Each structure stands twice: as structure tokens, then as C-alpha cells.
Amino acid sequence: MRVLVAAILIVQTWMLGASAQTTAAAQPRAPGQLIIIVTDENGVAVPGARVTLQGATNSLHGETDLAGRYTFAHVEEGSWQLRVERETYYVFTLPAVQTTGTLEVALTHQQELRETVNVSESPPAIDPAQVSAQEQLSGIDIINIPYPTTRDYRYVLRYIPGVVLDLSAQPHIEGGGTSQALTLLDGFNVTQPASGQLLARVSTDALRSVQVETSRISAEYGKGAAGILKLGTGIGDDHYRFAATNFLPSFQNKKGWALDKVDPRFTLSGPINRGRAWFFDAVDGEYDNVIIPELPVGQDKDTVWRTSNLAKVQVNATARDIVTASFLVNWLHDDHLGFSTLAPASTRPEDSENLYFGSFKEQHAFSEESLVEIGLAFSQYALDQRPEGNAPYVLTPETAVGSYYLRAHTIARRVQGIANWYLPKHWHGRHDLTLGLDFDRLIYEQIFHRSPLSSTRDCPAGSSTCEPIALRSTFSGGAPATVYNTETSAYIQDRWSPASRLLIEPGVRFDWDEIVRRPLISPRLAGTYIVNGSGNTKISAGVGVVYQATPLALIAQPFQGTRRDTFFAVNGNPSSFSTMFSVNRDELLAPRFLNWSVAVEQKLPQQIFLKTEFMRRTGIHDFVYNTFGSAAGTNFLLQNTRSDEYYAWRIDLRRTFKERYMLTGSYTRASSRSNQVLDYSLDNLVLNPQVPGPFAWDVPNRFISWGWFPLIRGFDAGYSFDARTGFPFAAVNDQQQIVRPPGSYRYPSYIALNLHLEKRFHALGFYWALRGGFDNITNHQNPFTVNNDIASPQFLTFSNFDRRAFTARIRFLGRK
């Protein structure tokens, strides 16, 4: 801790001295020096904007820095035209500019409904300032892409190359576990503090962008070995706007006509004080009436309701201060969580969850180029699960019966503080320095109560020597417990441009937490090189070390108590084992991952962009519970013996047409494996010594594509396509012991083609958009459940199929 305090004091002293030097060095503009400052419509700096000065015989080019500035050092006298553009913004042009001075430019975010007709979207281009391996969907892309469950933004993530959704809709970035990804909402960490899951929900209509960074990541980001998921939401401007989506219910005919679902979304935004303060509010709700026809009456229905609201305010307090505050609330209730063909309604628990997240951020400009950003956020996740009744819970070879055995109450909190300082320097080229601090305080409270449960086998009819009970488990202990952790981080990141076509990003990060209690140093180095003057070919490469955050749920596992398993042979002879978990914090290490990659981007004729990339990530010292001895059921100790291995080769093609129309395609060949692939817990009934194999989300081959293009008579067509290898799974016997390791079997290949048509029209003085189409139009049988009990007559029987479905959507877009 003393090392961290000393490092912070040194960094702060250096920053203050550098800021003073920058201010003292400010001089009047030299002749021919033109400074372009680019902000958005709310006065926020726009980094990475392409700035072009077009003269009569030549042109000058550049990209804005993190403060939204670019300086043309030597502009000759003459006639120059200015053009500023960046993807997801409208192009800004100025027919004549002065060659000396400072010019402020405001770029406007693309809107679903344009304010004027004489604007054009910024065309795509190879970005020389983008070093990280990054993929992005804009808010308009998210609205346009047809995909099932559009009320949940997590389902659109599957159309980002490198992101795979598991059967629980949890995202896996580049073969990593969900907890190995750092998810940021407007710059703040919103991963569940204990489990690392992505549970925060915001309306899809509130999203302005979704970005995924998987390699060559800045030292600003840690705690996410697999990558970074950035969710950016909108804010109001000087126009009042109201939009509504899916405000009409849908119906289904599975066992007679019944309500299917209703999932309305509403957004409202506008000025509080024009030109200075704005608000934004996005609310969405969901009511689902889930029916599984294969189940008997009384066991075939589940009801789910959910709502969320995101409220934001931005105030430009002064010309140098921008203040933003937000508050997000989520509520969820599921009558029968985990309801499926193998788990009828009465066997599943009632589930209630909520999330409260609040944030405050201020950006202050100390000088013309130096910016500092400070922020504070708080989040709380709460969960309550309780069974429907008191009947004993039994797993048969065909299904589950009785009442669920687990009653749970958990609360996970995070308090986060961040500070970032951007400070440009000039020494053998331009240096864009960023320094920052991050502080997190995490608290996890848990209360679990478990009832006995049993697993049975099928005995021959009339047999008197066959024992039907294969396994009986009882639980003891498990008093209420609270686990704490404090995380502190500091980093320094440089963007060095020693030449016009070369950009190098060295950085180093320091992390420490009170559980592992070891200083962690993460060096990073990456760069890009533009091969030719046209900017049509770029090569990127980088290597970096990332340390994974300590998962509180694993640390708290020993407080859940013990389990005693009694195994019964077919003749009835019993054998018993006790299971308990323990943690020795003095022996724990931080999981360390080495990530390296190389990529080539090429602009082809007809505005086609090609990108191919290879990346490899190797992890050591990952957390895993290990058993002592080979017997099923014994003591488990949290250790750092897991090693992970991931590689991926990818090729992407993208073709952008006029306005918002686009076609994309991406193929990935990948492998995600571990030397110890099993995750043990009191609730994981699969009992077996550790085995190597693929992770449950391993996908060796995958092709995704989506597009949006115009048809006739004002109709637009959109499609999305996802084809991949099926997920791996293991086979167990009637005593829940693994008899075939993970990877021995896989689900069938997943193939889904979604095709929709949309018509935008004007009626009753307002603009509307009406869409209709088919999800899984080929009706490919994509199962979500499998019977993996090798002793069951239904072994390898797949169910819960994703079938073809017609869906419709209506959107109220308001006036221009």
C-alpha cells in the first residue's frame, strides 16, 4: 500500500509540474498555424475525428487527440475547405477557412430521424489512431439489426465478431468467461461485483454505441483478461424528442390463444437550459407469458416481468467544466427461474432481483489541451430466490420433481472512484499522455439455505434387488456471511507519434487488492503503421499483460457450509463422503494473462473494408477449487492451478452504402480450452476429479453476418445470420458423476437466419416505422436443453428448440 501511495504522489507532482510548463509555454499563434477543436452537440470533446483541409492543389490530414484538438502547423495562404468526419456522426464541412487561428467545430451524432435533409453520414475509413482490436455497433445499428429478443441488448452482442452468447445469454468475449470481461456503462464498471456476470439492463433505445476491445488494450483498463465491453448511452440536445417502441402486445397459439408478451420502450430527452443543460430518460418494461407445450397442464407456464429506467443529466457549468449524473434502476421477477422441458414449473424457484446504479462525473479543462476527469459511482445488486413448496427435490433420469432445494438471498455492492488526466507533450514527436487512478470498494453479503435432494435411477420393472435412489445429498452449516475487498489501481499510457504514419502506445498499470495483497505490474505495448500515403492499408500489433480481478463469490464459497453425499449402488450398498470448501488467502496469486495479436486492414474497391487478425491469450494462476484425492466428495481448496489457452483467427468484410445501409460478414476459427475445466460448488451436482477440455462456450467455427439495405416503394430489408459449432457438454451417470468429459459431445450446429422488412411513413403529423419478419426463418432446430444422463432412456435427447417465429415491431419516431 505504501508503494501505491508513493506512486500516486509522484504522478500527481509530475502532472502539476507538466501542466504549469504547458501553460507557461503558451504563445500567440504563429502565422499558418490553424487549430481545430472538435466537440459534439453537447460540448464534449470528440477524439479520433478525421480533419481534412482541401486546397486547390493539395490536401492536409490529421486526427483529433483525446481533447478533440488537431493543429495544422504550417498552412500556406490560399483557399482551403475544411471537412471533419467521424463514424456515427454527420459530416461537417466549411467552404472557406482562415489559415491562422482557432476554429471550433461541433459534430452532431447521427439520429434515427434526421433534423435536416442536407446532412450526410460520415463514411467509414481505416482509422490510423485506433490501435486496439475494436469492434463497434452504433445505436442505429442496434435498432436496425433484426434479432430475437430485441428488448435485451445482450442478444445483439452476438453480432459483434468475437462475442459468443451462452445458453443463459451471458456474453463471452474472445473465449473468456463472462467474469473475465470488464463491462463499462458510460465509463463505470457495472459487472456484478461478486459473480462478474453481466446483469445490468438498459433500454436498447438508450444505447448510442456498444464497443468491444479484445487485444492491444490501453493500460487504462484492467481486471478484464478477455476484453472490455463499453456501453455508451445517449443524452439530450437542444431539441425535445420522444420515441416509443413495441407499445402493443403480442399473442401466441401454443395451447390455445393467449397473451405472449408486451415489452414497451420509451425515451424522452431535451434541453433543461438550451446550450447548457440537457436531460435524457429511457424506460422499458417486459411481461412474458412463457408456455412449453411439451409439459403437462399446470407445469407448462412461467411468468416473467421486468422494468428498467435510466435517467441522465448533463450540465456545462462553465466553458471548462462538464458535469454528468445518471441513475439506473432494474427490477426483475421470474415465477419459475430456469423453467424448461427438463425442469417443470413447480420444480423451479421464484426469483426476484434488483439493481441500483448511480454515477457522477466531471470533466475539467485546465488549459487549452490538458483535461482532467473525475468520477464516482455506486451500484447494488440484490437477489432473492425461494422454492415454491416443501416437497423433496428429486432428479430423475427424465426430469426434475418436487420443490427446488435452494433458498438464497445475496447483496453485492461496489463503490468506485476514478480520475484520469490527459496531458499532451512534444518530444521527438507528439505524446498524448494519460494518467489515472481507480479505487473500488466491494461488499458481498450472502445467506443460503439448502434442503436435501436426491438423484434416482431407472430400475427394471418388478425388480426387487435394484435400489432406485442413486444419490442423496444433505447440507449443513451456511450461516450469513459478508466478504469485503478493496481494489486500487494506477496507470500511465502514452500515444507517441514519432512519424506521420506510425503510432506507438506504451503503457504500464499497477493493481492491488486486499485479498491477494500482491503488487501487480502490467506492461503493455502496441502500435499501428499506415503502409502508404493513401491510408488504405494498416498493420497493427501488440502484446500486453492483464491480471484478472479476484471473484468475491469464490472467496465467499466456504461460508456456505458443507454437503454430505451418500451414493447407493444398484444393490443398495451405501458409501458416503462429505464436501467442504476452504480458502487460504496467504497462498493466493492473481491470475495472469498474456495477450498478443497482429492485424491487417485493407480498403478495397467499392468501399469494401477487409480486416484479418490473429490473437492468442494464455493464462496462468487462474482460480479453481481443487480436490485432495481422487474420491468424489472431499475437501476443496481454492488454488491457482488452472491454465487457460485461447487462440482465434478472424477475417471480416464490411461494405457501407449511402445513408445508413450496410452489409457485414465475419468468420472466426477459434479454440478455448483449460487444463482444469470444471467449476465446483455446493450446487454443482456433477462430481468428478478435474479434467482438461474445452470451456462450455467453446466455438471452433463461426460465421456471422448482418445487413440493412433499401428495397422498392420506401421499404427497407434487414437480415442477421449466425452459424456456429454447437456448445460442448459432458455426460454423467445416475450418481451425477462424469463418465464422458466435456467436449465428448456437442449440441447440434446452431444456425439462425432472421429476415425483416420495415416501412417508415408519415401519418397523423408524426413519423412511424412498422416492421415485420421471421426470426429463424429456416426453422432450424436449435436446442437449448439436452438430457446428458447416460443411464436415461432419453440420453442425448435435445429439447427447448428455437423455432421459426413471426415478429412485428412498431416505433413512434415523433416529428423532425
Image (cartoon, rainbow, N blue to C red):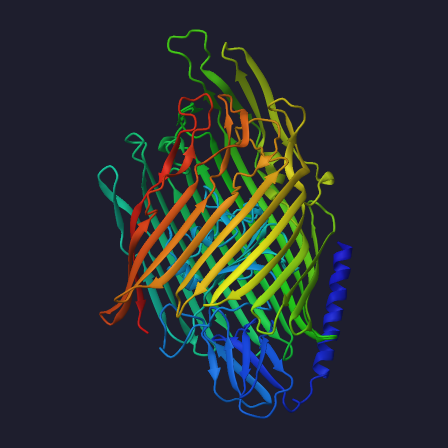
Residue 616 percent coordinates (x, y)? 63, 49
Using the rendered image of the protein, determine whether residue 623 is visible from the camera's viewpoint. Answer: yes
The answer to which of 403 and 752 lies nearer the viewer is 752
Q: Quadrant of residue 342?
A: top left
The answer to which of 151 and 665 lies nearer the viewer is 665
Using the rendered image of the protein, determine whether residue 349 is visible from the camera's viewpoint. Answer: no
Residue ID at (37%, 61%): 708
Residue 530 percent coordinates (x, y)? 62, 68
Q: Is residue 91 above or below residue 340?
A: below
Q: Is residue 305 above or below residue 810?
A: above
Q: Quadrant of residue 482?
A: top right
Q: Quadrant of the C terminus?
A: bottom left
Residue 159 percent coordinates (x, y)? 45, 53
Residue ID at (66%, 68%): 503
Q: Is residue 684 left or right of residue 591?
A: left
The answer to which of 764 and 328 lies nearer the viewer is 764
The answer to which of 696 and 52 lies nearer the viewer is 52
Residue 74 percent coordinates (x, y)? 64, 86
Q: Quadrant of the N terminus?
A: bottom right
Q: Is residue 781 above or below residue 65?
A: above
Q: Is residue 695 above or below residue 596?
A: above
